Image (cartoon, grey):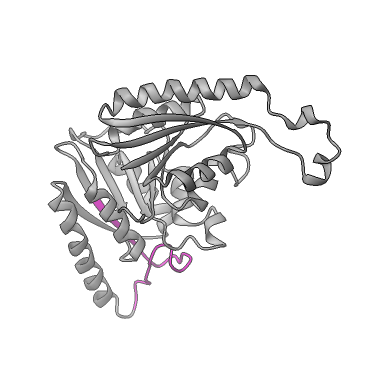
Amino acid sequence: MRLLIAYDGSPSADLALEDLAHAGLPAEGDALVLSVAEHWLPPPALAEMAPPYLLEPPASGAQAARRDAESAARRVGELLPRFRVASAARTGSPSTQILSEADGFRPDLIVVGSQGRSAVEGVLLGSVSLSIVANAAASVRVVRKRRPFRGSRVEGERILVGFDGSVGSWEAIAAVARRNWPAGSEARLFTSIGPEPTPEGILWTTGVKGKEAEKLDRLWQKQEEAAAPLAAAKLAVDTALRVGDPRRTLLEEAEVWGASSLFVGATGLGRIERFLIGSVSMTAVTRAPCPVEVVRRTEGA
């Protein structure tokens, strides 16, 4: 596996490093830790009139980014001792630089914290983590602090997978099945069915009327088929169906079940939906009580 880890020294970025031990990663691979010294350039028309020193990034910022990347790379080496770990520092817009680095590095997975140091992040829809989820060609794992779970806790991980029978949800299942989860880990396939509608292609729903029984039978059959590769990966698997808008019910299930990770497919993030907070994957990224992995199929997958 090839990992691209975005690191900015924030508490959220530190959580993303610690979460590597809970993501079911393989024993060996390549990891690149990238830190970006944030530097915003003026529009081209103004840049032509600006003195050169205003267009140059502060040297202190670039040096700090390099130190952050090297420090984080050492930590990744401790957490993933059989990975080959490198570090890099860039200057510019964090999301632009991370996506540009991903184009060259071609990672299977990009790991980011849910909130960074940027004063803009968390205020605008175009925050770093959301921009990466919307535009990356690879899967993206957005890490936030897990909420305390008061119920009984299994020894391993609890992986919740949003399943709707679509190509994207099957890719999410395949991603979970390929991972190296600790003994005692559980997986739950969760599907939300009508009557509240969602944008077509994001998470399949059906109204509970008419040929309800026939549709539910087909869905249960799909869930049984989807459970097979997870069981083959030695995960304890169960399924859950709920009525309601998946943007709400999926997050409620993650909270009640005590999910340690939530996996959703990226299929359906079109030119409009990918920027709407109302899409299932984007809502999960911004509001889930645990790390969220938005899965895209890569050439090596």
Determine which quarter of the picture holds residue 202.
bottom left
The location of residue 75, given as percent across then percent down, is 36, 22
Magenta stretch? 188-209
Determine which quarter of the picture holds residue 220.
bottom left
The location of residue 1, given as percent across then percent down, is 30, 43
Q: Is residue 282 above or below residue 49?
A: below
Could you tell whether 63 is left or right of 265 in the image?
A: right
Quadrant (top left/top right/bottom left/bottom right) for the C terminus: bottom left
Counting the numbered discs, the total is 0
Magenta-drawn stretch, dominant element (helix, strand or loop): loop
Could you tell whether 232 is left or right of 58 in the image?
A: left
The location of residue 189, given as percent across then percent down, is 26, 55
Asked if residue 190 is among those painted magenta in the image, a careful observer would answer yes
Res. 148 visible in picture: no
- Residue depicted at x 29% and y 75%: 212
Q: Nearer the viewer, residue 9 or 32?
A: 32
- Residue depicted at x 52% and y 45%: 99
Q: Is residue 297 above or below residue 292?
A: below
- Residue depicted at x 63% and y 19%: 60
Could you tell whether 183 is left or right of 65 in the image?
A: left
Res. 214 visible in picture: yes
Asked if residue 40 is among those painted magenta in the image, a careful observer would answer no
Could you tell whether 76 is left or right of 62 in the image?
A: left
User: Which residue, as the protein is rendered here, is positioned at the far right?
Assistant: 49
The location of residue 215, given as percent across then percent down, is 28, 74
- Residue depicted at x 54% and y 32%: 116
Q: Nearer the viewer, residue 72 or 186?
A: 72
